[in-house]
Image (spheres, rainbow, N blue to C red):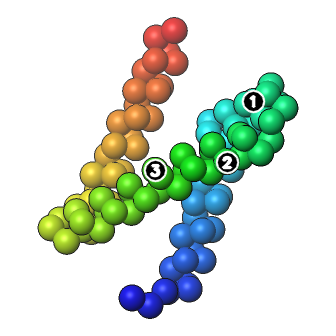
């Protein structure tokens, strides 16, 4: 199993840019500000992100053997659109 440095770099860049300023980062910011415990918040958040990433990568690797990548991308896009529509619905309903 050789590491693909180009894939590592593109994955890092995509995730890094996608996660900047999202609700996870805001939550981490708030926890660190309220608790004044940088290291504890950093370790907890890092552990959670590593575990969720491990689960997603493992599931993607297994499911990718049985379902074509195009289908997975279509389903993922539909899920994102669904969450966006639900968010808009809730915002207009309020």
Residue 69 lies in what quarter of the image?
Answer: bottom left
**Residue 61 shows up from this direction:** yes
Other-residue count near label 3 (Cα within 10 Å), few / some / many at <14 / 14–19 / ≥20: few
Q: Secondary structure at mark 3?
A: helix
Give the vertical position of 34 relative to 78 (above or below).
Answer: above
In primary-sequence order, the first of circles 3 and 1 is 1
Q: Residue at x 34, y 43 (%)?
A: 79
Mark 2, mark 3: which one is toward the viewer? 2
Q: Secondary structure at mark 1?
A: helix
Q: Residue at x 56, y 86 (%)?
A: 5
How far apart marks 3 and 1 lie (CA) works out to 21 Å
In primary-sequence order, the first of circles 2 and 1 is 1
Instruction: Check contact, mark 3 vs mark 1: CB within 8 A.
Output: no
Q: Position of residue 47 (x, y in %)?
A: 57, 50
Q: Secondary structure at mark 2?
A: helix
How far apart marks 2 and 1 lie (CA) works out to 15 Å
In depth, the one of 8 and 76 nearer the eye is 8
Q: Residue at x 40, y 34 (%)?
A: 83
* Residue identified by numbered label 2: 43
Q: Position of residue 64 (x, y in %)?
A: 24, 68
How far apart marks 2 and 3 lie (CA) works out to 14 Å
Give the vertical position of 21 relative to 73 (above or below).
Answer: above
* Residue identified by numbered label 1: 30
In primary-sequence order, the first of circles 2 and 3 is 2
* Residue identified by numbered label 3: 52
Which dot marks residue 49? none
Q: Residue at x 15, y 67 (%)?
A: 66
In depth, the one of 35 and 87 nearer the eye is 35
Mark 2, mark 1: which one is toward the viewer? 2
Q: Is residue 43 left or right of residue 52?
A: right
Q: Position of residue 82 (x, y in %)?
A: 35, 36
**Residue 19 shows up from this direction:** no
């Amino acid at each position: 199993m050789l590491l693909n440095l180009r894939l590592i770099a593109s994955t890092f860049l995509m995730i890094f840019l996608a996660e900047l300023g999202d609700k996870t980062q805001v939550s981490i910011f708030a926890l660190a500000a309220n608790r004044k415990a940088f290291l504890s918040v950093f370790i907890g958040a890092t552990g959670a992100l590593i575990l969720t990433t491990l689960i997603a990568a493992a599931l993607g690797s297994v499911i990718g053997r049985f379902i074509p990548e195009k289908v997975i991308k279509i389903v993922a896009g539909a899920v994102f659109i669904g969450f966006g529509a639900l968010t808009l619905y809730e915002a207009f309903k309020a």
